[in-house]
Structure formats: structure tokens, C-alpha cells
């Protein structure tokens, strides 16, 4: 589709006092706070899981030592995708337009590309229970039956989905502290970020910044106070869903072949002004220990 003089005829006449609707303030970039961003030269990337070793056994006098082997774990594949968009303006529209609006189109393209980045990344959390969004172990990001290589399972969600409360967060900390690796050895993970929708912002601030038990007249301390960084994300679509992001290695990943770049030229035959943007990346998660997610009550 090409923008012509008939597309916005008011831009051809002088006397307009202002053009509005194209210059709103944007949210700061958010996805890079959670996703580990890396570059790649490959069309697809594979991340291979390998276990450590298990517990040692008792060795009897004169008996040989029992030897153990690590095991190959699950594999995560990231496939690069290209996201692109463009706009086209006739030479006549470029010549006659009175308000310098066309020169703003590159900034608009850049804004759309940046919001595309946010939407694509946060959709992994928006679809945390969807069978169409699976990780290395073959299940959704938020699951009661994540699989370990030794055959055991674990949950990275509450036993009963609950809204964000001090008690729910305390239980999440306990659940995360009880995680084990693929050989059943305990691992020490810490929640770092609390991710909420804009609807849960003030509830989250009360919980994270209150020194004493939230909503109580007693003198019990609030053990959550000061232990998490808050991230309010307008791209989270479920208003009462909340997510804890841990400090696990190889958790949320974003692999980039190239970042958003802009091209601008005039078509030889039509003389239309052509502007395009494109970027190529993949996103997701490798180790589901990276998140603990409650869908809300």
C-alpha cells in the first residue's frame, strides 16, 4: 500500500495549527532486563543440557569405588526469525506535504520495531501455560510437571494458583529454595525480579516496600521487603498473573542475528519513497528454573 495525496489531503494545505497522535511518550525498554541477549551467526542455535554427578555412596573396606557418569539432558533449539515492515510514499505526496510529517516516518518505523521486540518477548510469559510455547523439556514455561533427566518432575508454579500476596510470595521463595538438579542435588537459586502487569503495580509496591506485615496491625516483619526488584510490564495481558525471575544461568534467552536496521530509497519506476526496517532474532527460555509463575486466582 502506498501513501498518496489522497491518503491525507489535509497535509497538503497550509494553516493547520498542529499534528497530533504521532508523538506519544514510550515506555523504557523492558525485555532486556529479563532476557539474556546474545548475538549469533547461525540460522538456528542449539543449547544442550548435561547433568552433573549424583551423591556419593559408602565404600566398604577393600571394595572398589563406584563410578558415575553424567547424562545428556534436554536440548533447546532457537530458530532465527526475521521481523520486517515498511512504508511507501508517492513522489507527489513528498513534494506537496506541508508539515514535515513524512520526515517523521523513520522514527515511527523505529518505534513500531521496538514495540514488536517487547511484544514478541513478553508473549512467552503471556503464553506461559500454552502447549504451543514449550521449552527444552517439552512442556510449557509454567508447569506442575517439568521433567528432570532422572525421571523426576518439579513445579515452577504454586500448587494452587493465587493472586499476588505477601503469603504467596513467601511460599514461592520456599518452593524455589527446594529446587534440585537433574541428579537430585540441591541448587541455590534466588528470585531477582517480580514481573507484574500494570494492574498489579500498586499491590506489588505495597508488598515489596512495606517493612511490616502487609494489611495487618501487628508488628510482624515483612520478610519480602527489599528482596526483589519490581518490573511493571504493560505487555503482560493477564492482569493478575505474576512472575518471579530467578538468577539461573541459561534461563530466558534472546539470540540476535541482526538488530533493527533501516533502509531508505526511491523506486526507479514509480519514484515512490520507500522506507523499510527489519531485524532477525529468536527468543524463549532454556532452563525453566528461570521463572516461577502464578496465573492468579
Image (tube, rainbow, N blue to C red):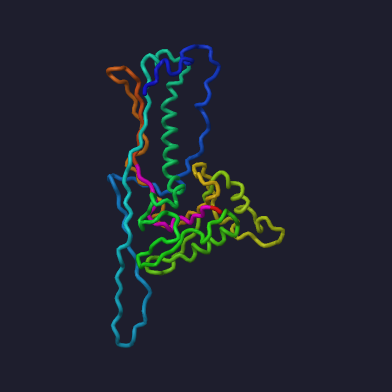
Q: Residue at x 32, y 17 (%)?
A: 271
In this view of the protein, can residue 193 be seen by the observer? no
In this image, 277 relative to 214: left or right? left
Q: Which residues are magenta?
A: 281-295
Q: Is residue 17 above or below residue 67?
A: above
Q: Is residue 120 above or below residue 9?
A: below
Q: Position of residue 30 (x, y in %)?
A: 48, 43
Q: Residue at x 63, y 51 (%)?
A: 206
Q: Position of residue 58 (x, y in %)?
A: 37, 82
Q: How many marks?
A: 0
Q: Is residue 267 above or below residue 170?
A: above
Q: Position of residue 28 (x, y in %)?
A: 50, 39
Q: Can you tell which quarter of the image residue 137 is in?
A: bottom left
Give the position of the C terminus as an image quadrant.
bottom right
Q: Can you tell which quarter of the image residue 114 is in?
A: top left
In this view of the protein, can residue 14 be seen by the observer? yes
Q: Position of residue 136 (x, y in %)?
A: 35, 56
Q: Residue furthest bottom?
A: 61
Q: Residue at x 51, y 28 (%)?
A: 23
Q: Is residue 241 above or below residue 269?
A: below
Magenta-colored segment: predominant secondary structure? strand
Look at the image and say whether residue 287 sits in the magenta stretch.
yes
Q: Residue furthest right?
A: 217
Give the position of the N terminus as an image quadrant.
top left
Amino acid at each position: 500500500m502506498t501513501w498518496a495525496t489522497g491518503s491525507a489531503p489535509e497535509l497538503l494545505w497550509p494553516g493547520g495549527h498542529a499534528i497530533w497522535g504521532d508523538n506519544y511518550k514510550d515506555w523504557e525498554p523492558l525485555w532486556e532486563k529479563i532476557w539474556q541477549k546474545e548475538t549469533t551467526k547461525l540460522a538456528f542455535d542449539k543449547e544442550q543440557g548435561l547433568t552433573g554427578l549424583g551423591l556419593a555412596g559408602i565404600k566398604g573396606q577393600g571394595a572398589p569405588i563406584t563410578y558415575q557418569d553424567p547424562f545428556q539432558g534436554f536440548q533447546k533449539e532457537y530458530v532465527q526469525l526475521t521481523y520486517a515492515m515498511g512504508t511507501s510514499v508517492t513522489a507527489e505526496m513528498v513534494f506537496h506535504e506541508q508539515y514535515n510529517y513524512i520526515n517523521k516516518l523513520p522514527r515511527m518505523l523505529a518505534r513500531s520495531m521496538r514495540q514488536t521486540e517487547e511484544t514478541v518477548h513478553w508473549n512467552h510469559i503471556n503464553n506461559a501455560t500454552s502447549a504451543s510455547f514449550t521449552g527444552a523439556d517439552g512442556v510449557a514455561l509454567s508447569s506442575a510437571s517439568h521433567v528432570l533427566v532422572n525421571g523426576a518432575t518439579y513445579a515452577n508454579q504454586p500448587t494452587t494458583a493465587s493472586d499476588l500476596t505477601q503469603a504467596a510470595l513467601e511460599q514461592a521463595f520456599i518452593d524455589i529454595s527446594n529446587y534440585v538438579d537433574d541428579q537430585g542435588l540441591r541448587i541455590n537459586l534466588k528470585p531477582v525480579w517480580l514481573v507484574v502487569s500494570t494492574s498489579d503495580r500498586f499491590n506489588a509496591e505495597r508488598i515489596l516496600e512495606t517493612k511490616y506485615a502487609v494489611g495487618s496491625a501487628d508488628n510482624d516483619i515483612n520478610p519480602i521487603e527489599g528482596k526483589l526488584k519490581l518490573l511493571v510490564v504493560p505487555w503482560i495481558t493477564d492482569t493478575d498473573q505474576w512472575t518471579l525471575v530467578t538468577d539461573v544461568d541459561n534461563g530466558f534467552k534472546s539470540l540476535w542475528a541482526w538488530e533493527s536496521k533501516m533502509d531508505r530509497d526511491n523506486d526507479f519506476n514509480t519514484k515512490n519513497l520507500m522506507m523499510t526496517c527489519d531485524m532477525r532474532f529468536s527468543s524463549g527460555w532454556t532452563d525453566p528454573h528461570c521463572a516461577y509463575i502464578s496465573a492468579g486466582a
